Image (cartoon, rainbow, N blue to C red):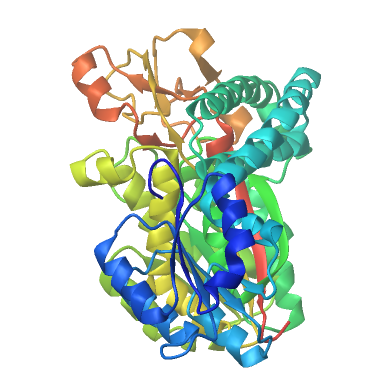
Amino acid sequence: MSSGKVRILWADDEIEMLKPQLFFLEKKGYEIHTVSNGYDALEYLDQDDSVDVVFLDESMPGLNGLETLARVKEKKPGLPVVMITKNEAENIMESAIGAKISDYLIKPVNPNQILLALKKIVQRDDLIEGVNANKYKEEFRQISMSLLEGPDYNGWVDVYQKFIAHELNLDKGNDPDLKGILTTQKQDANREFFKYVSKHYTQWIKTGNGPLLSHQLMKEKVLPLLSTGKPVVFVLLDNLRFDQWEIIKPIVEKNYRIQSEEAFYSILPSATQYSRNAIFAGMLPAEIQKHYPKWWLNDNEEGGKNLREGELLQEQIRRLVKKDMKVEYVKITNVSSARQLQDNALNYLNNQFTAIVYNFIDMLSHTRTEMEVLKELAGDEKAYRSLTYSWFINSPLWATLQKMAEKDVHVVITTDHGTIRVKNAVKVVGDRETTTNLRYKVGRNMQYDKKEVFEVKNPAEAGLPSPNVSSSFIFAREDSFFLYPNNYNQYLNLYRDTFQHGGISMEEIICPVVKLIPKSRG
């Protein structure tokens, strides 16, 4: 909108009869230019770029309102237009709405109706920002009280989802102070979440009494769908955070009805090698190493660490379902395989169970440290979410899901872990065998500040294998990342403000699992 007064162009062949309304708006501070026909309206728009909103009478002689509207939208697609009509015929309303009017009013119009329409258009962003700010201010105290009381694992899911809801709302506005308060409160929450997970994690592993964890996901949430007799398609988007799911959710809902939207906790490390293998095996990493030693590689061993997911999935289904069925595992790591996925979409429905692993988001987050273009595109949380939306709506994956929505199928969308934007470097000293991961490390005789990490001296207690007899694990807290003292500043500048995973934060640990059925079949 233009600066200063809001400028209105009003086209109506009975403009003289609207003098009371025009006077009312001028008194409210609006600047109005009037014309009596569509041709003059278009000519005025050619000469003046400062018009903020157009009011169009639908039934003007010569060039009528709908025809004028079409030409206005050709010239200035983003210019808001309010249609004013005596005619309530459905086809006229549909034509006007189809041409993307901002609002419409039925004659005779009273001044308050006009004022409300203007407020919705001209002050929409300010109004939304005000409402969203008030919502967060009201809930700020509630969240603070929840943190003081100490949420359980379900309570932490609620806290995290509240943060996401407020982040997405505040993204629509531009209040840096309020965003700063939210960021600070979320940092405080992550500090408490780190303490909570550190205190309870090994007990969850030992007893099984805790949140749903990665290795329990298939058994509890996915494989029971096979009993319906419908094909089940399991889509794992590597690195999909809960806020990214919320961003793509409206797209998915165009074709699918959400049956359930739940959360599970990624195991530690919240990294692909551990969490995704655990999902497909239905086992903790230590159990995978024990039962399938040839299929497990430790961090310090050469070779791909997730090359046996298909076999692990087959073994889990054989173990739990106990009957033969047609199962297919598909992994998408490049554009060529993504196109094949789209081409084969309906063929997958001949299987009883299809698992699709889509690595795009994972590649995006890692590649960001190497490519300056992506550093610009995903410079903050809002941009990271926006990039996910742009990718998904144009992706072969969404095209595949649209094809599948024509059939009677169960679709599950989930992830293996999330990511967090890291900021604070923590020094760790280790030998050559110590891993280079930024959010967790495995090694012997590591030196670090114990206050800055969750340490697991006995990996078996956390369901983890030991590369060596004296190996231990450490996990980063909140938004920190591990660096060696060598070339410290160089790596600090390289990795700060990048999205990483493997440690303990709400963003990495609390993951979505969503069950869908096509709207055409539901």
Q: Residue 122 appears at what percent x and percent y?
A: 52, 52
Question: 160 above or below 520?
Answer: above
Q: In this view, does 209 lie to the left or right of 336?
A: right
Q: Which of 372 and 444 is in front in this view?
A: 372
Residue drawn at 42 percent across, 91 percent down: 62
Asked whether the viewer can see residue 284, the reply is no
Q: In this view, does 31 lie to the left or right of 134?
A: left
Q: Nearer the viewer, residue 183 or 108?
A: 108
Question: 440 above or below 158?
Answer: above
Residue drawn at 63 percent across, 74 percent down: 256
Asked whether the viewer can see residue 496, the reply is yes
**Which image quadrant for residue 399?**
bottom left
Q: How many tags in the picture?
A: 0
Q: In this view, does 254 lie to the left or right of 420?
A: right
Q: Residue 276 appears at what percent x and percent y?
A: 50, 51
Q: Nearer the viewer, residue 452 or 258?
A: 258
Image quarter of the C terminus:
bottom right
Q: In this view, does 254 lie to the left or right of 80?
A: right
Q: Residue 203 appears at what percent x and percent y?
A: 72, 28
Residue drawn at 66 percent across, 29 percent down: 201
View extreme (front): residue: 16
